[in-house]
Amino acid sequence: MKVKLLAIALGACFAAPSFAQTNVTLYGILDAGIQVSNSGKGTQTKMVSGIADGSRIGFKGTEDMGGGYKAIFNLEARVEVDTGSNKAGNLSDYQGFALTKGMDFPDFGSAALKGAAAQTLAGVRSALQPKYNVNATSPLVLARGGGPDGGLFDRTAMVGLITPVGAVLAGRMYTPAYEIFNSADAFESGMAGSWGGITGGTGGLLTTGMAIRSNKSVQYRIELPNGIGAALMYGFKNSGYIGLDKDFIAGNVKYKANGFDVGIGYNRGTNTDGSTGLVTTTVGGSYSFDDFKFFAGFQNMKNENSILLPVFYDAWDLEITPGLKAGGVPAPVIAAWTSIFRTNITKNFKLNADSYSLGMHYKVGNGRVMASYSHQDDKTLSNSDVTQYGLGYDYNLSKRTDIYAVYAYVKNQNDGQYAPGAASASGGFTEVPGQPGRAIQFGIRHRF
């Protein structure tokens, strides 16, 4: 909905009449539905916001300055339709036990310390992976907010200049490698069948395999008439996938013409200590032919030095240790348990995996059938491979409104605990490692 009067209204609200834009667009997506899943003790039925697409509201504008130059901006905020908030989280209620693998705190022969050891492990698991509806203030919960800092416009906040030789953009934006990943996903980074539901480390949610967006970044983009395009991004301090990187570099090369939408992308983050963080290389895309659209993608993910480790160390020091001291646990025991925690969380958070996905769409009347097969080969000692199958149908009620249904099955191995997710939230975990996850989702999506 294009509304020139919107600029005038906003200008009046902020006492800045010079704010008026040549062209301002208010837009959004409202998406919600029901998920019936079984990833543990029994069937759970939940209302979920943003199954096929993350619900959002946004503003974008352009000012044509002539000669091939345009000023542009985009502000886009997350909206959780089920609660009206902008905070997301896990869909499942279970904990990520793989993150605490090896943390068997010894009791040193004391009955009191034996109880304290068991309580400590439970506390660590709670701190590392609070349940979906917890509204706490731990470092981990803050890191998982609406954005890296819980910002209002956590989806996109960008301003830029389009020139005859490309565009220069600045702000919080999608990363170049993620653009390639999204184009290769038959479920378009949404619904239970999305390829992104199984990419990442053994633990699931926090051991992400992709920097979807980056804060504090500048980007150069160009699109040529022959269908070839490219992007180059650099992130300054506090950039990267949760806004903690020292710096972030990324780029892609794409070809979009003659039915093809394919490319190769690369993301790399650098930790505050100068070590290499999450590195992702992605190749793939789609090809459209008559009523068919075929998808294929491959991604290599590696993270030997997770930027989240200091956050976990803080969780131990600020949330677990004070409780141990208050409970009378001797200082040497706390020191030993601290060493066990740090050693194992560092090992458990390593990411080294290859992942691939194959999928297709087939148009049927006003709708389309969607199907995908995705697999991840875990190269760490855990060897927690995972395979996901997805099948869905999306029907257009009108140009802007559609309804959909999808089924997904996730087969976990060893310590794998992946559960089917949605566009706006991770599926979280199965109840125990190695357990399969299943989900059926029904929803409606409206674009305006």
Image: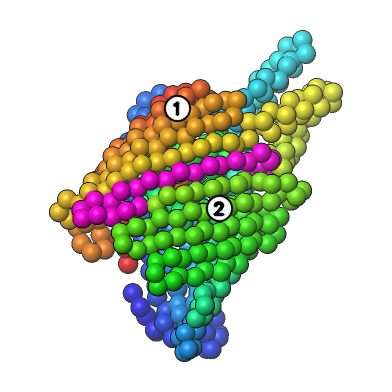
- Quarter of the view holding residue 345: top right
Left or right relative to 29: residue 200:
right
Question: Looking at this view, is 283 or 317 the one in front?
Answer: 283
The residue wearing badge 1 is 412
* Left/right of residue 226 with respect to residue 349 in the rendered view: left
x and y percent of residue 193 in the render?
Answer: 36, 41
Q: Residue at x 67, y 23 (%)?
A: 103
Query: Residue 244 at what x, y percent from top left?
Result: 67, 52
Whether 121 is drawn above or below 286: the answer is above
- Identify the residue under disc 2: 266
**Secondary structure category for the residue under label 1:** strand
Question: Given the image, on which type of amino acid does mark 1 rest?
Answer: Asn
User: What span is colored magenta in the figure?
Assistant: 286-309
Q: Is residue 271 visible?
A: yes
Report x, y in % for residue 428.
48, 37
Task: Please state, as top left, top right, bottom left or bottom right, where the C terminus lies in the image.
Answer: bottom left
**Nearest to viewer (mark 1 / mark 2):** 2
Rounded to the nearest whole Å, what is the CA distance between mark 1 and mark 2?
Answer: 27 Å
Left or right of residue 272, residue 280 in this image: left
Mark 1 nearby-residue class (10 Å; few <14, some 14–19, many ≥20): many
Q: Position of residue 391 (x, y in %)?
A: 28, 39
- Tag 2, which secondary structure? strand
